[in-house]
Amino acid sequence: MSEKEERPPSNMATVSSSSRTTYIASVVAVYWFVSISMVYLNKALMSSKEVSIDAPLFVTWFQCVVTTAICVACGKVGERSRRLPNQGSDSGKPNFYTQFPKAEYRMGTARRVLPLSIVFVGMITFNNLCLKWVEVSFYNVARSLTIVFNVFFTAVVLGGSSSFRTLLCLVVVICGFLIGSGGEVNFSPKGTAAGIASSLFVSLNSILTKKILPVVDDNHWKLTFYNNVNASLLFLPLILIIERETILSAVGNQLSSPLFWGAMSIAGFFGFSIGIVTVLQIKATSPLSHNISGTAKAAVQSLMAFYIWKNDPTFLGICGIFTTLGGSLLYTFVKMRENKIAGAK
């Protein structure tokens, strides 16, 4: 009798474990799909004359507008959900939308977020310019110096120091960047420069985000809303000065095409969705597993580009991809280990 009583919990544990594994696999798969699709779609929008126009600032501006609109919509749904009994869920647990705050734009808060928004504009602008000018297979290599800038700015701004193992990881990444650049058949100096600038702004964005988050009650969705509203306003004078003629010449062509606006809207949706799936993956796994997943995704994304975008593979180019990704992965393990040791003291 006791044996029969012991079996159900074992079966329940197996089912629970299986469901958990399925959920994690689903979240990781969605993260990969959204992230890779966003890169490929942005590449088409930045470089394909059939799909888009030669106005990267306008394309980026529209994506910020779409993200702002989604933040407003999610905020309204979230506000209604929080008013429902049991926070909108029969089980008593908050539903998905309760995480989104009401989208309110306050000038005082917006001014305090503005320095981060300026860096945010630089980050997404140079990121898209890099995609426009380099091959997709080289994109991850061109933007691989982010951790180098992270360590540099941490030392300069926060006065921190780095271990020998950390510096060794940076050397691996830099070597991979140089190897990949040397092996790139269609090497673009301006695209590579845009990738380096993007890495720099990504690093600055990470540092400033930690500083600015308390201004918006440590809510990253509020920060997303303010950043994209500010960015939408900051882009307008740049677009009028740099891209006005290009946009006007496309009024009767791409700007009247449903394909163009459909691709633009989907890219904007993916731009918002990547924030959601990133948070979901971190919660479902761990920060370390998220970085490992991101590294593996970048490798698959680069290798797929050789087939989808007909990029020319070279031995040095492939070595550069895996060296930069390997150095980044090693850096993740080293930092996690150092943080664990520091936390134990």
Image (spheres, rainbow, N blue to C red):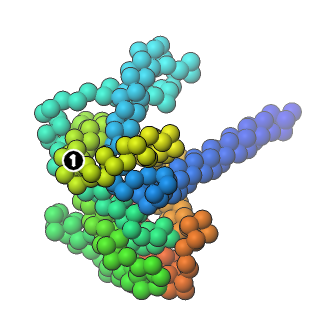
Residue closest to the eye, 329 or 338 = 329
Residue corresponding to mark 1:
240
Q: Position of residue 215 (x, y in %)?
A: 20, 39
Instruction: Determine crowd level at label 1: few under 14, some 14-19, many 20+ residues with C-alpha closer than 10 A.
Output: few
- Position of the C terminus, as image quadrant, is bottom left
Residue 344: image quadrant is: bottom left
Using the rendered view, name the quadrant where residue 91 is placed: top right
Q: Residue at x 31, y 46 (%)?
A: 248
Choose between 305 and 50: the one closer to the eye. 50
Figure label count: 1
Q: Name the element at disc 1.
A: helix
Res 142 seen here: yes
Residue 114 x %, y %:
17, 45
The kind of residue on which mark 1 rests is Leu
Reply above or below: 303 against 258: below
Query: Which residue sits at x=47%, y=45%?
Result: 260
In this image, 14 relative to 319: left or right? right
Residue 328 seen in render = no
Q: Position of residue 312 (x, y in %)?
A: 55, 78
Q: Nearer the viewer, residue 46 or 225?
A: 46
User: In this orientation, which residue lies closer to the viewer: 237 or 269?
Assistant: 237
Give the quarter of the figure containing the N terminus.
top right
Residue 232 horizontal/vertical position (percent): 26, 42
Q: Residue at x 37, y 48 (%)?
A: 250
**Rendered view: 237 above or below 192:** above
